Image: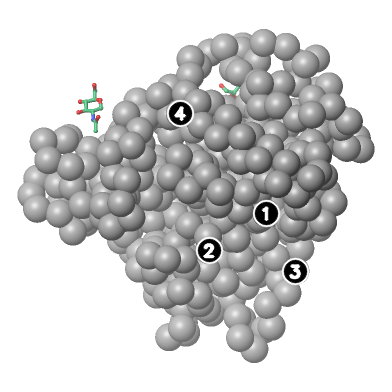
């Protein structure tokens, strides 16, 4: 019982924007904001809407200065215009299944990484894990964090599209919708259109955090063992672990962690983590930290005083699934949920840039051309 108001509107939009040729009408955000009636707009969704006119104003000004129409702004890559960008929506069940099919396809194709360098990569999916593992130092420094992860999402999305026939774009998970109860959600309920279920019960003791007590760990939520339900129950995790948060994972045979170490996907779908990603936390991060140092400190988790869930947004995302490899700083893209929470972080960046640096917001359109929402 999903609440997309009109599936017909959705499919006509999809064919207009993503499948058919460029649209002749001037693009407007209002045309494409498809809403799921089960979820009222949260404060961050409203911020997104409220800041869209800044982009439109910037585009109009730029076009006027160049003496061209908005539709003729030179976009990169060439040929992309606001009118043929893909726009976000909440995906229908068949659309979610198409996405899942393409991820399974990537997992069934041989790796391209040279065997001599990444002997443990069993599939094309693992190439992206190996990239994140080997470039982690650069990907996570302050100046590169957002852009580098946008790139990670974009190259993965490109592989799903070009190598596995996926017609859509990488969806993000809207944190707030999962925060109070992630386990039965459309993302993790373990059915055929979910991103797989929770892990079996284990006792791994929670996830250490660099904060003072009582916030020195994200408490364990009861899982942490192998995922036994949903499309990824038979997935073989091979690379790593390098910095695992779960006990009893055999060490990788190579000291660069890139050897074959076949094992199950483990998760602890964790409400204590997701609660730190509620919309009011995200809103406060965006609106109350206008200088970049404050923003990064808060983003990366300097604890909010008197908050029960003070972990920053990235932790709220990563430890939504946690486990192995999701909870491993280096190997986390080895859980396909990675691209969903990083998609959310990327969306937050897009909103920040629109508020604080609107003339750079176009960069948001360069590498990622859509913000599709899973649900
Ligand atoms: C899986 O769960 C989602 C979300 O609750 C629901 O929309 C969908 O119909 C379910 N699919 C099946 C096959 O039960
Ligand atoms: C978010 O809302 C919750 C529930 O109302 C509240 O306890 C918490 O302090 C709020 N946090 C922020 C950062 O606004
Ligand atoms: Cu990363």
Q: In the drawing, what numbered circle is on residue 47?
A: 4
Q: Which residue is mark 2?
A: 148
Separation of disc 2 and disc 3 at Cα? 25 Å
Residue drawn at 48 percent across, 15 percent down: 40
Residue 65: percent from left, percent from top: 70, 46
Image-quadrant location for residue 153: bottom right
Separation of disc 1 and disc 4 at Cα? 21 Å
The correct choice, above or below, for 39 with respect to 44 in the image is above
Locate the N terminus by quadrant: top right
Of callouts 2 and 4, the N-terminal one: 4
Q: Which residue is mark 1?
A: 366
**Left or right: 71 as drawn, with respect to 123:** right
Q: Which residue is mark 3?
A: 110
**Left or right: 22 as drawn, with respect to 39:** right
Q: Is mark 3 within 8 Å of ligand 3?
A: no
Of callouts 2 and 3, the N-terminal one: 3
Q: Secondary structure at mark 3?
A: loop
């Amino acid at each position: 019982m999903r609440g997309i108001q009109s599936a017909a509107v959705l499919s006509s939009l999809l064919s207009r924007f993503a499948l058919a040729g460029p649209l002749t009408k001037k693009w407007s955000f209002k045309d494409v904001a498809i809403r799921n009636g089960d979820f009222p707009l949260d404060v961050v969704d409203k911020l997104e809407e409220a800041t869209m006119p800044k982009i439109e104003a910037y585009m109009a000004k730029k076009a006027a200065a160049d003496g061209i129409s908005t539709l003729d702004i030179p976009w990169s890559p060439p040929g992309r215009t606001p009118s043929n960008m893909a726009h976000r929506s909440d995906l229908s069940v068949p659309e979610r299944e198409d996405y899942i099919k393409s991820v399974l396809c990537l997992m069934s194709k041989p790796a391209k990484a040279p065997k001599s360098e990444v002997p443990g990569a069993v599939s094309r999916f693992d190439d992206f894990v190996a990239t994140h593992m080997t470039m982690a130092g650069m990907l996570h420094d302050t100046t590169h964090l957002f852009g580098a992860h946008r790139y990670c999402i974009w190259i993965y999305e490109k592989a799903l599209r070009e190598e596995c026939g996926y017609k859509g774009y990488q969806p993000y998970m809207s944190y707030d919708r999962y925060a109070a109860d992630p386990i039965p959600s459309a993302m993790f309920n373990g059915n055929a259109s979910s991103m797989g279920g929770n892990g079996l019960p284990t006792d791994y003791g929670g996830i250490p955090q660099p904060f003072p007590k009582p916030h020195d760990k994200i408490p364990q939520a009861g899982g942490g063992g192998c995922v036994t339900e949903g499309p990824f129950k038979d997935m073989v995790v091979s690379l790593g672990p390098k910095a695992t948060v779960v006990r009893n994972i055999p060490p990788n045979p190579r000291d660069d962690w890139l050897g074959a170490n076949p094992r199950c996907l483990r998760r602890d779908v964790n409400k204590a983590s997701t609660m730190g990603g509620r919309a009011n936390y995200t809103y406060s991060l965006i609106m109350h930290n206008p200088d970049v140092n404050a923003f990064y400190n808060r983003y990366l988790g300097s604890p909010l005083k008197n908050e029960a869930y003070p972990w920053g947004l990235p932790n709220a995302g990563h430890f939504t699934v946690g486990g192995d490899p999701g909870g491993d700083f280096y190997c986390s893209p080895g859980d396909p949920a990675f691209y969903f929470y990083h998609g959310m972080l990327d969306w937050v960046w897009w909103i920040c840039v629109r508020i604080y640096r609107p003339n750079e917001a176009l960069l948001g359109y360069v590498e990622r051309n859509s913000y599709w929402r899973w649900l």
